[in-house]
Image (spheres, helix red, strand yellow):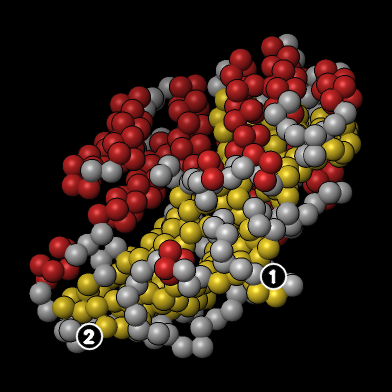
Amino acid sequence: MRSIPCFARFTICAAVPLALAGVATSASAAGAVSTAAPAAVELDARLARPLLLAGQKNSAQLRVSLIGREAQAVEAHNRPEVNVCIAIDRSGSMSGEKMENARRGALSAVGKLRDGDIVSVVAYDEVVRVVVPAARAVNRTALQAGINALQPGGDTALFAGVVKCATEVRKFASKNRVNRIVLLSDGMANVGPSSPAELGTLGGELAAEGISVATVGLGADYNEDLMAELAVRSDGGHVFVERPADLARFLEQELGAIAAVVARDVEVKIACAAGARPLRVIGRPAQIVGQTVTTSFGKIYGRRQHLFVVELETDAGAAGSSRPLAAVEVAYHDLLAHHDSQLRQPIVAQFTARGAEVDKRADPAILSELSILNADLVAERAMKLRDQGDFAAAQQELRQNADQLARDHQQYRDPRLQNKVREAKQQAESLSSKPSEWNIQRKQMKKSISDAPLMGLDL
């Protein structure tokens, strides 16, 4: 993990996005780097309620937002190089239409790569084979021949397939490339390590190397908990493809997403001041040790908002006073400018004796984003209730979720909340007591829940 410089002391000032104010700094091994060029990442850290009630303890929500530079601002020739290995399940269940669509999808996806990108292809059943060793994508004939030769085989050594892909990616791994594994499977891992915990541990180890894993689950029989855990722990992405005919489109979209990455190796540290205790983090896996919150993002996509919320308990303050609550520090590797950069922002709260002012000054955009993140927590609770066979309680959770989102949308008028309302209503009304139907819906819910932490939100 990259070391992030700490503030020697907190400075009392307005809690505005310093990156926007031009005081964010960048650094590289060669020394100071000019900040004339636009940064790949914009930091915007703010309190949902910048005014806290004086004379009592308060609960404060600190939203940290990282936004990738707009895609249209990145010239095509300047996009980061891609170093990708496509791992294709060729177990017996992939015979027929599935294998044909897997071949077609892989061919279509690699066709989107530039000649300077790195690509490799691995196929796995109970045996793992390197179909196309890692090399620049100039030899399209060899790529096509290798992919077209894929045939279904036996069981599913998914763990070994990922490990072999990682070996191919490491051959050309670079801080200035997007290093990614794209894993396709239609079934259960049944050879070698096969639990979500084991695959999650592997994902975390790969993330520490700067390699992320995007998982593509095909059909109704794959283990979505395993595939989502591998994606979340490696900060990749998870996609559910119900119909084989849609596979080519989804694989193309994944390659397009890889090419839209503008920053990698993102480390966030929040040093909380005395009198501000971090309680929990919403929307992102994170660690809380004493007064410090840390989390990491494997990548930042252009024109996407990657965010999380830290809940703080603050000590009482006097009316009319101000107090620093935290310092947000971000270090990342800029894939557009090819250097390491740092962003810093202090967070300050003001105290008032007028309770009405607290809500009046609340930030509707942040409260809306918090509503979106909380809705995913409720959906996850409902999914667990349905897994336990408590259909009525699960449906009630989902209906209450939809109602709360509808109220929040009416108050905050965020179009993203409107989309979330439609999703929550659909989840509640289509919840099925039939195991086969729940199997499909569960995969859809798992994918939806993982979207915000892995892919970020639309702007």
| Residue plotted at (74% across, 57% down) | 175
Residue 212 % position (x, y): 68, 48
In the picture, residue 430 is in which quadrant? top left
| Residue plotted at (46% across, 88% down) | 9
Which image quarter holds the N terminus?
bottom right
**Mark 1 belongs to which amino acid?**
Ser
Residue 321 % position (x, y): 22, 85
Relative height, residue 221 to residue 213 (above, below): above
Relative height, residue 52 to residue 249 (above, below): below
From the viewer's side, name the closer residue of 372 and 301. 301
**Mark 2 belongs to which amino acid?**
Ser
Q: Secondary structure at mark 1?
A: strand
Residue 368 % position (x, y): 29, 50
Question: Which residue is identified by label 2?
Answer: 321
> Which comes before the other along the chain, label 2 or label 1?
1
Q: Which mark is residue 237?
A: none
From the viewer's side, name the closer residue of 119 and 182. 119
From the viewer's side, name the closer residue of 453 and 15. 15
Q: Which mark is residue 28?
A: 1
In the picture, residue 312 is in which quadrant? bottom left
Q: Give the left or right position of residue 193, taking residue 430 as reference.
A: right
| Residue plotted at (75% across, 22% down) | 107
Residue sitting farthest toward the top:
96
